[in-house]
Image (spheres, coloured by chain):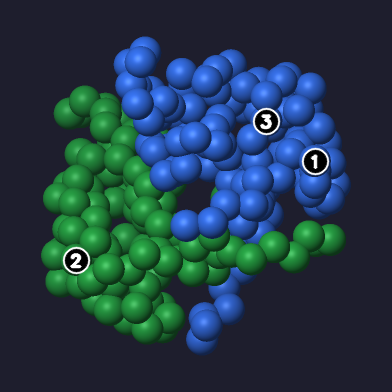
Chain colours: A green, B blue
Amino acid sequence: MPLDLPQTFRHHVFCCAQQRPPGHPRGSCAAKGAHPLWQRLDQKIQGKGLTDVGMAMTGCLGFCSAGPLMVVYPEGIWYRPETPEDIDEIVESHLVGDTPVERLVMVLTR
Amino acid sequence: MPLDLPQTFRHHVFCCAQQRPPGHPRGSCAAKGAHPLWQRLDQKIQGKGLTDVGMAMTGCLGFCSAGPLMVVYPEGIWYRPETPEDIDEIVESHLVGDTPVERLVMVLTR
C-alpha cells in the first residue's frame, strides 16, 4: 500500500449485533447471546480508559453459524467469546497486552 | 503479534450507518446521505464478484462531524465519499487495485 498513515486506533473492535427472529434458519449473533457480551466489552474498554481502542457494533459479518463473532483490526483476528470471562480475557490479553487469546480465535474461511 | 493467521478478507470495509434525527447536535452519517453511497458500494462489490472483500454496516464510528465515514481494514484507511463517483473510484482503485484514493482519505485523530 502506498499510504503509510498513523492508525487511528491501536485496536479497532467490530462486534456483530445482528438480530434475527427465533427459528430463523441462519440464526444470528444476537440470538446466540451476543449483546450482553458486547455490553461487557464496552464497559471494560471504557472502564480501563483504553482510549486508543475503538469499538463499533455491526450488522451481519457473514459467518452466522460461528457466532457470536467479533473481529479485531488491524490484525484481523476473529473471536467467538461465550462467557463474560472470555470477554475479560480478550480485553486484558489482547486489547491491553497485545497478545491474542488463541483458545478463542476463530479461523474463518470464505 | 504472535499469531500470523491468513486474513479472512483481503479488504474488509466498515460503513457507518448511524441514523440520528434531524437537528441532532452530533448529526450522523445517515443524515449526511450515507445510505445511498453504501448501497452503491455493496452493489459494486457484489457486481464485480469481489468475494475476498467483506463489507459490513456499523453503528457510530465516533467521528460524526467527518461523515459519511467508512474504514477499510487491515490497512486502516478512512474515507469520506460524497458522490457515487467517489464510491466507484474507491472500488476500482482501492478494493480492486490496492491503491488507496488519496483525495478521499480522512486522517482522523482521537
Amino acid at the residue labelled 1: Arg
Among all residues in the image, which is located at the extreme top?
Answer: B22
Please state if A30 lies on the left or on the right of B48 as rendered: left
Q: Do the residues at pointers 2 and 1 share their chain? A: no
Work out whether residue A62 or residue B40 is closer to the camera in this orientation and state it. B40
In percent of width and height, residue A3 lies at: 78, 60
Tell me the residue at 75%/65% (across/down).
A4
Where is the N terminus of chain A found, in terms of image quarters? Answer: bottom right
Q: Which residue is mark 3?
A: B81
Amino acid at the residue labelled 3: Pro
Numbered tag placed on residue B50 in the rendering: none
- The tally of labels here is 3
Q: Are marks 3 and 1 in contact (CB under 8 Å)?
A: no
In percent of width and height, residue B18 lies at: 40, 29
The chain identifier of the residue carrying mark 1 reads B
In the displayed structure, would residue A77 be above or below residue B104?
Answer: below
Tell me the residue at 83%/36% (across/down).
B92
Q: Does residue A103 appear anywhere in the picture?
A: no
Q: CA distance from mark 3 to mark 1?
A: 10 Å
Badge 2 crowding class, 10 Å Cα cut-off, few under 14, some 14 to 19, many 20 or more, is: few
Q: Which residue is mark 1?
A: B103
Q: CA distance from mark 2 to mark 3?
A: 34 Å
Tell me the residue at 46%/36% (across/down).
B64
- Dot 1 falls on a residue whose secondary structure is helix
Q: Which residue is mark 2?
A: A47
In the displayed structure, would residue B86 be above or below residue A110?
Answer: above
Work out whether residue A2 or residue B49 is closer to the camera in this orientation and state it. A2
Q: Earlier in the sequence, mark 3 or mark 1?
A: 3
Q: Do the residues at pointers 3 and 1 share their chain? A: yes
In percent of width and height, residue B67 lies at: 54, 33
Work out whether residue B94 or residue A50 is closer to the camera in this orientation and state it. A50
Amino acid at the residue labelled 2: Gly
